[in-house]
Amino acid sequence: MSREVHSGPTDEFNQARGEPYRGDPEGGAGTQPQPLDKLPLDEWHRSKGARMVPFAGYNMPVQYEGIIAEHLWTRENAGLFDVSHMGQLFIHGRGVAAALERFMPGDFQAAKDMKPKYSLLLNEEGGILDDLMATRRGDDFYVVVNGATKYADIDYMERRLQGGVVIDHMRQQALLALQGPKAAEVLDAAIPGVAELGFMEAGPFRAFGHPLWISRSGYTGEDGYEISIPALAAQDLADWLVADERVKPIGLGARDSLRLEAGLPLYGHDLDDRTTPVMAGLNFAINKRRRAESGFAGAMRILAELQNGAPQLRVGFDVVGRQPVREGAHVLDGEGNEVGRITSGGFSPSLQRPIAMGYVATGLAEPGTALKLEQRGKLFEARVATMPFVAHRYYRKGAP
Amino acid sequence: MSLYFTKEHEWIRVEGDTATIGISNHAQEALGDIVFAEVPEAGRRVNKGQEAAVVESVKAASDVYAPVSGEVIEGNQAVADDPALVNSDPEGQGWFFKLKLDNPGELDGLMDEGAYRDWIKTL
């Protein structure tokens, strides 16, 4: 038996786009692999039976009891995710809001206090360098970026920020996510008041003798929280949470299948520096004032694509049959021409069938369009699907 | 009856000139939740080292190679219908296919059960 194709967010399996390494004619011979960083909860994960794999420069838990069981547990109860590999940045100084607007298309100047906003770090060609969450805290911004891109992000921003604006990398902070329909009742018992937050609201709290920053947000499609906590207190919180029978620790594997069902793109797979916000269907992240004023990295291309459409669009696929179609598969039209590429795909534990996400020529992006997918020489029938595949269940204040 | 294992984590149970082939418990644990299995049809000829079946977990797709040459007598429809059987009973009900052996000599050099279980501890 041999492993052929891997998918998902672990770069145990690396080469996100399935491209061979081309940079070094020696094929990396004689180079030392980079040592992996350790999560603050590394020992804790192992003690809970985690299988650890390299991801984003860290050893990370990919699963505990099994991806499907963990996935379904999160949809029905509450799952605890360690996302401490992500970069937590505190960006501050004179003119910070205007400075951030140079490479992100959000309205940071009018951003309301303690309301996280999804935004995109853009290059000059309008390609996406990262997707992130930015929250105004008074005059400053708290920004959470992807783990695999954090050092490049910091470097990119620092080279474009003026003297007065400073990025602090909050290396001493762990980041835990509690996700699922029971997350609010569980967390509110430990940290009273968190249940009052609405979806995409955040605030400072105190627990276990430490200050915490908690936002009601996440990347599973479920209600839940992301909790920034000093690394030295992370184990106390994790222990307290999993002592509750409604909570189990959940690995990266289920995090990937949950976000795929929720239709949420994963950076390095569904988004990269050749993808624009319009191609990716992330137009909501391009603020109205910013569209009118232009003046952000890549604005010329992005505004033209908003006006005239992008050549390709990110779509979902329902795949006929039972076999998963994964990242790297080709999308073909009725005549067998390649019209796109799968960027994420796998078996949906909630729907018990294969689903996928990818890019197709804009004329073929209409939901219901029948296309073929080609993987390892085999053709699969597929249909463009409306995302999310599994409805979001975010907590909206005032909603019934 | 004798039981053999390969370094590719397949097992081969031989009775007369019939070989039943599946993946080891170690292999199913490494793969995790299995969501798809494709088995060969009766009558197909497979050569040693040729891909004969497909197994896919949530995370990974793998080929199952024929560890010996022969003609497929039966593919296990039960694992095609319920791939999780490979997780729950990998070395029993979760077999993949049966072959009529071309050359029993190909079994020489494969590991017996004790040697295989010892070897995987070193991985």
Image: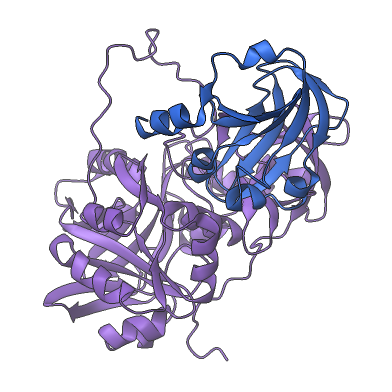
Chain colours: A purple, B blue
Query: Which image quarter is the C terminus of chain A in?
Result: bottom right
User: Could you tell whether A295 is left or right of B2 in the image?
Assistant: left
The single residue placed furthest to the left in the displayed view is A209
Q: Position of residue A25 (x, y in %)?
A: 40, 8
Residue nearer the viewer, A274 or A52 = A52
Residue ID at (55%, 59%):
A68
Q: Is residue A79 left or right of residue A319?
A: left
Q: Does residue A315 appear in this view?
A: no
**Front one among A287 and A282:** A282
Residue A191 in the image, given as x and y percentages of width and height: 26, 84
Q: For residue A188, what is the image quadrant?
A: bottom left
Residue A214 position, x and y percent, is 29, 73
The residue nearer to you, when weighing A44 against B84, is B84
Extreme residue toward the top, this view: A25
Q: State whether residue A258 is above or below residue A54.
A: below
Can residue A158 be seen in this snapshot?
yes
